[in-house]
């Protein structure tokens, strides 16, 4: 057994993991474990911007940002968390600026800001310029900036190490077990503190904006160890994915003035959302598109509509939207200077995840009991700041605000008192059995992973998409039970211990199935429509029965986790009907 010992082990080198690392690098021994080389993390794909009420372009206030976050989340947002997000966003963005992030600038040298969906002035009067950005590569710049700073601060990186298991002993988290992809060896990391920052699970759907590595590993590992997953039914579909491919065309396009058009050339969003038009929140715009298509106004009667930027002019397109217009050229052979771009909603973002408190500490039940030694931040976590629907540019700010809070809390409050809990007996048992079990089935009988993966992703897209119903969800629940059984007998073709990407993909597929299980169960039980969760058979929001968070615990019955509920934290804004 390969054994390592650190005060803090951070799993994930995206924006959330690196932001936590930055708070801890000076005064503790820390390791960052990442299955990818850090700068390949999905944070690097984020395009549009990071929200903070700096007020550089026009009047803005953190309270307006808090309100928008709560309303955007269809009132499932915990308002104590939303307040922290909006208040601390401002300092967190300045931290990035001081570390060297090359933001776009206003003529007088301040950070430039642009509009994004659901971000408004004066509690909903109209759009406000709140998103700080670096062209359409904001996430790339965040990741590069923080990685450079982490290297400078001598953070220890274990790159291409894949976490397979979380160790909990006597009620305290005490380590993780990881597979070294280079040589197939198993490593135990013993720690006083673990931060899970492993990102989302968009690869559970066929049409998705998410990178190949977004497979919900952190969520699945925690779920298998008995921890709950919160509000997994709240999954966001971004309205503007490239048709059939799902690659994202950032909302920055609409922030800069792009139109969404149906077959009649009509800007139909205006009909549904007269104040915010194309800049209504994503859950709504995705539904508008689905409805237009259902009523026969998709382009040529097909299942897509158009995003048009041509009227913005070449100069603005090149200056503000260079990357995404290149995607349209490269993948669809469309020239955005003159032609509209075919789009459809694409699976994008997990509002749910591992439940945490506002310090980033993982909590395990409806009383918010803290599991000592375990933190989570970023898309893997549910604090819950996005409620039932995240606003654009509110994820990057979630990473830097709550990644920072987790790091600071560990440094100031937890580490001074904490000690190493002893490792459980046979700490690498589960991981070794998993890997050796899979490799021993190589070249044997049974099916390979491709069909299982394809069926999962196709059926999630079909049955657990923008619109769901009891019929589709029940069918998916059964499918998941079946896929779990098939996965347990999956056969590998590659027996090697050296960079065995097939082994890695099979493990990832197992994780995606666990995440899908919690998603479907939560969606089936939530007999209402709220935010990203739209039930054809229960089209109204039902605050009397469902203004509460779902907690899904893995059970012995495949497809059917145990569900519990906990109240939403409401401080200032009572739930109202959402109009935009
Ligand atoms: C195309 C796209 C555009 C987006 N644009 C925006 C935007 O403009 N503004 C905005 O606010 N949000 C945007 N988002 C959302 C936002 O980028 C993500 O939610 C966010 O970057 C997630 O960051 P993270 O740190 O939680 O995880 P990630 O950046 O996904 O990083 C996850 C890390 O965990 C590691 N990891 C995962 N599993 C394991 C494992 N088993 N073992 C070891 N390491 C592991 C990976 O190697 C990686 O380093 C966008 C998302 C996408 C997909």
Image (spheres, rainbow, N blue to C red):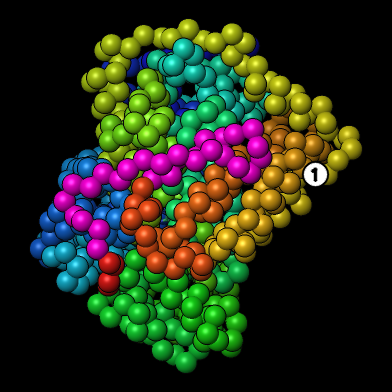
As for residue 483 lying within the magenta part, the answer is no
Residue 382 or 188: which is nearer the viewer?
A: 382
What residue is at 60 percent from the left and 57 percent from the top?
A: 473
Q: Percent x, y for residue 387?
A: 35, 51
Q: How many labels does the image show?
A: 1
Span of residues in magenta:
549-576
- Element under disc 1: loop
Is residue 337 positioned above or below 156 on the image?
below
Relative side of 355 to 223, left or right = left
Is residue 317 positioned above or below 111 on the image?
below
Residue 338 or 167: which is nearer the viewer?
A: 167
As for residue 570 lying within the magenta part, the answer is yes
Q: In which quarter of the image is residue 276?
A: bottom left
Could you tell me what secondary structure mostly forms the magenta stretch?
Answer: loop
Q: Would residue 93 be seen by someone viewing this image from the given angle?
A: no
- Quarter of the figure that contains the C terminus: bottom left
Q: In which quarter of the image is residue 273?
A: bottom left
What residue is at 89 percent from the left and 38 percent from the top?
A: 445
Q: Name the residue under label 1.
A: 448
Relative side of 291 to 115, left or right = right
Relative side of 175 to 272, left or right = right
Q: Would residue 268 be seen by someone viewing this image from the given angle?
A: yes
The residue positioned farthest toward the front in the image shown? 544
Residue 487 or 154: which is nearer the viewer?
A: 487
Q: Percent x, y for residue 214?
A: 54, 46
What residue is at 23 percent from the left and 47 percent from the top?
A: 570
């Amino acid at each position: 057994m390969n054994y390592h010992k650190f005060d803090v082990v951070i799993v994930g080198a995206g924006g959330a993991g690196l932001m936590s690392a930055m708070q801890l690098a000076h005064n503790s021994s820390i390791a960052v474990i990442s299955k990818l080389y850090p700068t390949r993390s999905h944070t690097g794909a984020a395009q549009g911007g990071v929200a903070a009420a700096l007020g550089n372009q026009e009047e803005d206030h953190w309270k307006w940002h808090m309100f928008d976050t709560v309303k955007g989340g269809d009132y499932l947002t915990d308002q104590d968390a939303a307040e922290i997000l909006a208040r601390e966003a401002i300092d967190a963005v300045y931290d990035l600026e001081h570390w060297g992030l090359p933001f776009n600038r206003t003529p007088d040298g301040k950070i430039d800001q642009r509009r994004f969906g659901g971000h408004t002035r004066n509690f909903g009067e109209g759009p406000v310029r709140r998103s700080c950005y670096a062209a359409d590569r904001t996430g790339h710049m965040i990741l590069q900036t923080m990685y450079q700073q982490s290297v400078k601060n001598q953070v220890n990186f274990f790159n291409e190490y894949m976490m397979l298991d979380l160790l909990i002993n006597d009620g305290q988290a005490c380590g993780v077990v990881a597979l070294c992809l280079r040589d197939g060896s198993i490593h135990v990391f013993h720690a006083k503190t673990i931060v899970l920052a492993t990102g989302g699970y968009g690869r559970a759907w066929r049409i998705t904006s998410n990178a190949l590595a977004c497979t919900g590993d952190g969520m699945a590992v925690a779920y298998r160890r008995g921890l709950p997953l919160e509000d997994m039914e709240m999954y966001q579909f971004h309205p503007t994915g490239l048709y059939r491919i799902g690659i994202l065309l950032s909302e920055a396009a609409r922030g800069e003035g792009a139109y969404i058009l149906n077959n009649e050339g009509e800007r139909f969003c205006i009909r549904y959302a007269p104040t915010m038009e194309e800049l209504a929140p994503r859950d709504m715009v995705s539904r508008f598109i689905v409805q237009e298509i259902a009523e026969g106004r998709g382009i040529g009667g097909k299942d897509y509509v158009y995003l048009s930027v041509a009227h913005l002019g070449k100069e603005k397109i090149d200056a503000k939207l260079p990357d995404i217009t290149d995607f349209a050229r490269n993948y669809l052979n469309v020239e955005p200077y003159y032609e509209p771009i075919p789009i459809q909603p694409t699976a994008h973002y997990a509002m749910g995840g591992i439940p945490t408190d506002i310090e980033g500490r993982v909590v395990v039940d409806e009383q918010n009991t803290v599991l000592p030694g375990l933190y989570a931040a970023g898309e893997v976590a549910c604090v819950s700041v996005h409620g039932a629907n995240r606003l654009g540019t509110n994820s990057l700010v979630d990473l830097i605000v709550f990644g920072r809070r987790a790091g600071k809390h560990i440094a100031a409050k937890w580490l001074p008192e904490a000690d190493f809990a002893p490792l459980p007996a046979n700490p690498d048992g589960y991981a070794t059995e998993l890997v050796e079990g899979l490799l021993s089935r190589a070249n044997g009988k049974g099916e390979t992973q491709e069909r299982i993966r394809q069926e999962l992703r196709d059926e999630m897209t079909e049955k657990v998409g923008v619109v769901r119903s009891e019929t589709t969800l029940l069918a998916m629940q059964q499918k998941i039970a079946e896929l779990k059984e098939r996965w347990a007998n999956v056969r590998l073709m590659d027996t090697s211990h050296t960079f065995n990407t097939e082994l890695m993909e099979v493990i990832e597929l197992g994780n995606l199935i666990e995440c899908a299980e919690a998603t479907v169960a939560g969606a089936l039980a939530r007999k209402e429509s709220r935010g990203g969760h739209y039930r054809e058979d229960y089209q109204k929001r039902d605050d009397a029965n469902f203004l509460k968070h779902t907690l899904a615990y893995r059970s012995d019955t495949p497809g059917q986790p145990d569900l519990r509920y906990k109240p939403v934290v409401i401080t200032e804004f009572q739930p109202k009907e959402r109009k935009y």
